[in-house]
Structure formats: structure tokens, C-alpha cells
Amino acid sequence: MLKFIANRVAQTLAVLFVVGTITFFLVRLAPGSPFDQERNMSPDVRRNMEEYYGFDKPLLVQYYRYFSGIILRGDFGPSYKYTNRTVTELIAESLPISVELGLYGMAIAISIGVVAGVVASLRPNTVTDYVPMSLSMVGITLPTFVSGPVLLLVFGIYLRWFSVSGWSEAEDKVLPAITLGLYYAAYFARLSRGGMLEVMSQDYIRTARAKGASETRIVFRHALRGGLLPAISFFGPALAGIISGSFTVETIFQIPGLGRYFVTAASNRDYTMIMGTVVLFAALICVFNMLVDIVLAWLNPRLRLE
Amino acid sequence: MPLLEVENLRVAFHTRNGIVRAVNDVSFSLEKGGTLGVVGESGSGKSVTGYAMMGLIPQPPGRIEGGRAIFGGVDLLHASKAELNAIRGRKIAMIFQDPMTSLNPFMRVGDQIMEPLRIHGKITSDAARKKALDALAEVGVQDPSARLLAYPHELSGGMRQRVMIAMALITNPALLIADEPTTALDVTVQAQVLELIRKMQQNHGTAVIFITHDLGVVSGFCDQVQVMYAGRIVESASVSDIFERPLHPYNRALQKSIPAFQPKGRDLYTIPGAPPDLSRPIAGCSFAPRCEFATDACRKGDLTLTEVAPAHGTSCRRVQRGEITLD
Amino acid sequence: MTVDSTLPAPAIVEVEPGHSLWQDAWARLRKNRLAVASGVLLLVMACACLIGPIFSQDYAEQNLSTYATPPSAEHWLGTDTAGRDLLSRILIGGRVSFSVGLCATAVALLIGVTYGTIAGFYGGRVDMVMMRIVDIIYAFPFTIFVILLMSLFGRNFLLLFAAIGAVEWLTMARIVRGQVLTLRRMEFIEAAIATGVPRRRIILRHLIPNVLGPIIVYTTLTIPAIMLLEAFLSFLGLGVPPPMASWGVLIDDGRKVMEEFWWLITFPGLALSLTLFALNFLGDGLRDALDPKASKD
């Protein structure tokens, strides 16, 4: 198990290193510079700016400086667009909002999805199976940038139950969290149902029945652990999806989170901001994937030995 | 009063390709502490009969179409879920063919062995643990306290079947249904497991229904034997009568096709044809198409299992009428 | 951007292209009403997108006299804030969405099948190295990468295909590799190798036809995933460049004015969702048809 964890940690670090490096060189090799849009910048000023930010140094030196800054001081450098502000500041301000939104979304996705999937699996091909599963099919084909505006239109504008933008009051948070969560709830529902159906047809469930175990005991003690493995392995992809989902949800509901900063930074060529967010998102996703793998190995005794 | 009395059990599976009548009019009884062998090839309905006793027929597609199975005053076929759960694992236990898949891979062996105790009554962890240790030691598992903490995949096939047996017998049930418990095991291990079941049966006075496709296994193990074919009991007798005085052509043909039962050098008999498709109605005797004694009359009318000798029943009407004798 | 992970086990057919398997599958598919309805819906949509714009030329023409009119007899789905007929815009957008979906899927298919077949066929160390590479790329946060690419190198149609195709080939490679690895060990392949059939021929004649089922199923499920990704990028303003419009662009445009003009978000959203819905159902239906075992209950 320790060896397995060590392996996964090493792999994660390797991926992070590659992601960081590729991002760095991609950003630098791409045409255009952050100062392109400021038309009346004189060549002198521009040269000064580039010197100030270290663009005149060889790429490798910049590369070294940049990453040693992150690793040693947690310093992602200055933002080129939001002058006088560092990327670290911007991230520190907006990340908590995105994390909160993501947590709500994940909580909705997992609670609704897993419960619906398990319930559906207990009586396959009956009403309690068809209804949640049809809804989940609808959910899967409704991307957040369609369901978000629809929810906003119906519950925010016509019914006026919730507010349509911002992120301060509790009522601001309902629609964005639901928008973000429902799509992945649909996935979790399908995966849990599939996993549970698979497990409930296993011989060891029959053994449990032969022991006189009640249906509740069979589901909770015998089936869930194996049946939820597919859903748990989806945690990693779901997080990645929720992060990219946050780009659209934060745009739709005008939430000042990191996702929106990333989207603006990408179109503004704010190098350090792009770099910072990509490295951060990558780190989040990789670390989370690693944790999920470790949890899976811990849950599944057969994997634990390898 | 017998321990278990089954009357006219009928089980069918309603599949996309029609209704498969897996068990038809099966009746038998079993005394306390007795051993009953149920023999037949795959698809003969022998396992379905066992599952029906335990309420383990998956419904749908399966359906109990009729009959009764009285055990301790309760009809197992029509008992409520709660009644059934009070009996399963406590008074009737079952072991299965494949110990590899029949144990929960996510649960420690010890927890699985102790589970019947926890389900059927309050017991402290220490007491349960002690019982589990004793049970493991009794089925010949080395170093039981370490095995309690193991996961099934860490044990060998024979070891797992021993664990299954310990788990089944930990509540001291009156009846054990063993569904081909040795089929998935190596030959050497088979003998050990058989011996173990016999020993446990003698120690605890447990009655056993032993379901198998292997006549050889039955010969050394059971008091009573019933031979099943195409969902029906075709012959039922004491073990010595089954082998020495077969009264059904199918039973005789089966024995003639087992190498160990035949003198060296003689050609083995093979039964021509294949078992019938149970999703189609069968008129008359279902073995008639493969039977060397069959006449046109065999393909019509109803069959009954009738005693033609003391405690020896056959469903063959030609034998019943004395038209043929089998050697 | 993720696709259902349950895929059929290797469909093992005879060495000769098994007619009966495909006929059986077709019969099963026809019995599945939802899948048939989905297929018909897709055909109708595709034809409308292909033919429709020929008859209505005003998709790009701006006309202030028809500024954002609600659905009417003249403009069935209304007009947008530049006075353009929404139906024509949706049909034109559909062309873009479908072609991105199909072309990027083709890219993914080509890379994925080649890569997976090679890894699975040669096995051993080649396979290990190739699959380890896939594992590592898999761990990349790819959506973010595509966004990065699109924002750095501009909104370029070809780059969009390449970027999306490059993301989606991984799963295809994994599936094909798994299937080929299983088939590789089957006797009829061993027999072909033993009798000296050239490798090229074994791969083309014996392996590919036998993994066709899963490939078809996964392709049907990849198309919606890619259309979704394209719409997502367009929604963020990183998709196809204007004046071209994909469904994602229309949804984004509609969202900005939806408080006043509900139809501008509703119909493009409906078009996208219905298409995704139909593609997913068709994919599910194909899976059931090609692999009856997987759908017993």
C-alpha cells in the first residue's frame, strides 16, 4: 500500500511538472503579447515593461525564475493586466468563492446522484428505476450552459424565487450550485445504478440472502461498498468537470470566482494569470485523482496488495 | 414428522424466449439428520429445487408456480420475507458451488463467518469471535485467528469452501443445502471437503441435501438419492437401491456412462441426443427421445413417480407396468 | 466532456465478416423504439442543416427592421438582435456543430484506433510503454488545455478540430487496445499467425472487423461529447470565429439578452440538447444491439 501511494505521488508530481512546463512554453511561444491591446504604448515604454517583467531574459531563465517563485514562495508573479496586483492575490480572492461553489455542486451531484442511482438499482425496470434514469438521461444531455440560463430564466426572472447574479447572500448561491450539481448528479446516478446492479447479481449477495440478511443489511453491508466503486472512480473526472463547469456557471451568474478570471485571462493573454490558474487547476485535479485512486485501493482489498 | 416435506413444487422462469419450466411436480421428504442426494445434469432443475427452499429464486424472471415446502410448520415457498429471513442462516443454511465468488471480496473472512450470529440474535463481539475461531478450527483451517482477518482472495479455493462450511454451520442449522460444493475444486480437495461435510453432519446431526451432477459423490455420501431429469424426479430410492437396482432407464444409462462404475476395457455408454428444451411443452416422458426402451406410448399422457418396490419410486411407466426390467 | 464508461465486451464473430451478427444487431436495433426515433430525428436534423440554408439566404444579413421579433409565420423561430432569421442561424450553426463533431471524431478515431491496435497487437513492452503514455496524458486537465490552446493561438477552425480530436482519442485507444489484446489471444488469430498470414493482413482483415462493434458504439458516444465541448468553447467565446455561428455561439448570444428575448436562448439550446439526447440514445441502442449480453436486465 505504501509503495502504491509512493508511486502515485511520484506520478502526480511528474504530470504536474510536465503540465507546468508545457503550459509555460505554449504561453511564451504563442503569437501576441499581453501589451498588444494597449495601442498607444511607445516602443520605449514597451521595452521597459518587458524588462521589468523579465521578458528580455532567455526563456530558460524565465522558466526557472517562475517556478522557483511558485515552489519557494508561493508567488505566482504579477498580473500583467490587473496592474499592481499579483496573481497570488487574485487567486486568494477568487479561489475560495470557486471552491465554495464547487463544494455545493459536488455535494448536490453526489447526494442526489448516488441516492437516485441506488434507489433505481434496487427495483430495476420499474417506475422507481425509469423515472430517475430518464431524468438522468435528460440531465446528461443538458450542459450547464443550457440548463443555467434556463434555470435563471424560470426561477430567477419569471418566478423571482432566487437572485440571478452575485455571490453574497444565500439566495445567490442556490441556482449556480444546482446548475453545477445537476449535470454531474446525472452521471453519478447512472454510474451508481450500473455498479449496484452489477454487484446485486453477484454470488456473494446470494450468500448473504442465504444467511438471512435483511434487504437493508444486504444493501448497506454487502452491496454498497462494491457497487459504489464506479461512482467513486468518477470523483476525479467529476472534479475536473466541475472546474470547467465553474467557468460557464460563474460567467452566467456573474460570480467573481477563479473560473471567470481564467476565462478573461485567456482572452487577454494575461500570461502569469493563465499560467497560475492552469497550474493550480492541474494541481487540484491531479492531487484529487491521486486521492481518489488511494481511496479506491483502500476500499478494494484486492487492489490493496498490488 | 419429517424435517422437510416438499409437495408438488413447480418453478418456471418467464424469459424473453418463453416460459422455461425448470421444476415440475417435485415431491420429496427428508428426515432429521438424513442425507438426500439430488443428482442430475445441468438444467435438470436440481439447483433450482434447492434455491426454491431458500427463497433464492430471482423473481422475476423466476416464479414459484405451485407446491408447498413445509419446514418446522412453515411453508418455505409462501413464507413472508421476515419469516424466511428468520429461518435462512439459522435453521437452514446453504453452501454454493463456487467459493471464489460466493464470499464477499470486500469483507474480512471473520466478519462474514460471524454474520449469521449477528443477524440471528444478540451476541457480543467477543463471543461471536470465539465461536468463529472454534468454527474455523473445526473445519480444519490452520491458524484461525490470522484467517479471521484475511480477505477471501488471500485464501485458496479449498480454504474458501471450508470457510463457507464454517459460516453455514456456525448457527447449528437443522438442514444444510449443499449446491455442488465440490464441483469447482481440485480433485484432491474435493475429497477433503466431502469428508469434512460428512464429519460436520455427524458431529452436529445436521440433515443435508446434497445437490450434485456426480453419481460417484452421492454413492459415498447419501442415504437417499433422487435422480432428476428435465425438471422432474425420475427415480427415488435408497443409495444402495439406486446403484444396485436401477428402475429408470436414465439412471441406468447414467451409471453405464461413468468409467469408474464399469469394468476395464468395456466401451463406455453414451446417452444419445441432448436434454429437451424446457421452454417447449413436453408430452409424455421427457427422456423418451433418448431412451432405448421408448415406445410411442411413452410420448403421451402424464407421468407420476410411483413406488414399484418398497421406498423405491420411478417415473418410467414401462417399468411400473413391468414391461421391461433393467439390469 | 466525459462519456459513459460501460462499453461492450469484445464481440467475437467468425473470421469471415459475420453477416448474421450484423443482421441480428440491426434487427435488435430496429426493435428499440427510442433508438430508432433518435436515428430518425438525427437524420432529419442533419438534412435540414444541410439543405435548409440553401433556401433561406438571410442568415448573415443584418436587418434592423426585423430587430428581435418573436416567432411568427414569417420567421418561425423569430429573429435575433441583428434582425437575422433565427431558424436559418440555427441551421447554419448546426452545420458547424455537426462538422466539428464529425471531423474531430474522425481525428480521434484515426489516432485512437491506430494507436490502440498497435499497442494491443504487439503487446508486451511496446504495449506497456504506449499505455503508460496514455495514462500520463489522461491525467492532464484537458478541457483547460484546449481552452488554453484556443485562447493562445486564436479562434481557428482547424486548430479546433485538432485540439478536440487530440483530447478524445485517448479513450478510444484504451478501448481498442483492450479489445485487440483479448482477440490477439484467440485461436483464430494464433492460427492466422501460425499459417504465415502477413501482419498487415491480420490486422486489417481479422482484428479491425472484430473490434468494429465497440468502435461504432464509442464513436456514437464521442460525437455528442465533442459537440458538447465545441459548444462549451464557443460559449466561452473561444469556438468558431464570427461570422460563423455554432450552436454554442448562438446559446451564448441568446443568454446575454434572454431577459427580453426568451426565444434566442430557448431554440438554440433545444437544438443542441435534442441532438445530444438523440446521439446518446442511439449510442445506447447500438450498444444494446451489438452486445445483447450487456443489456440482459
Image: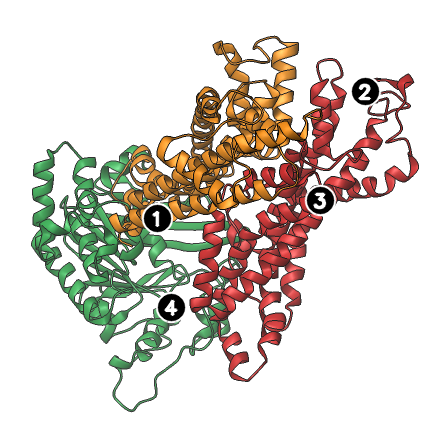
Chain colours: A orange, B green, C red
C31 on left or right of B229 = right
Residue C26 vs residue A290, the one in the foreground = A290
Residue A233, image quadrant: top left
Residue B178 vs residue A176, the one in the foreground = A176
Residue receiving disc 2: C81
Judging from the image, mark 1 belongs to the subunit labelled A
Q: For mark 4, give the secondary structure.
A: loop
List x then y, in percent, for residue C31. 66, 48
Q: Are marks 2 and 1 in contact (CB under 8 Å)?
A: no
Residue at 21% over, 36% down: B119
Residue at 50% over, 64% down: C119
Q: CA distance from mark 2 to mark 4?
A: 88 Å
Let me know if marks 4 and 1 both belong to one chain: no
Q: CA distance from mark 3 to mark 2?
A: 26 Å
Q: Are marks 4 and 1 in contact (CB under 8 Å)?
A: no
Residue receiving disc 4: B316
Residue receiving disc 1: A10
Q: Earlier in the sequence, mark 3 or mark 2?
A: 2
Residue type beneath disc 4 = Cys
Residue receiving disc 3: C100
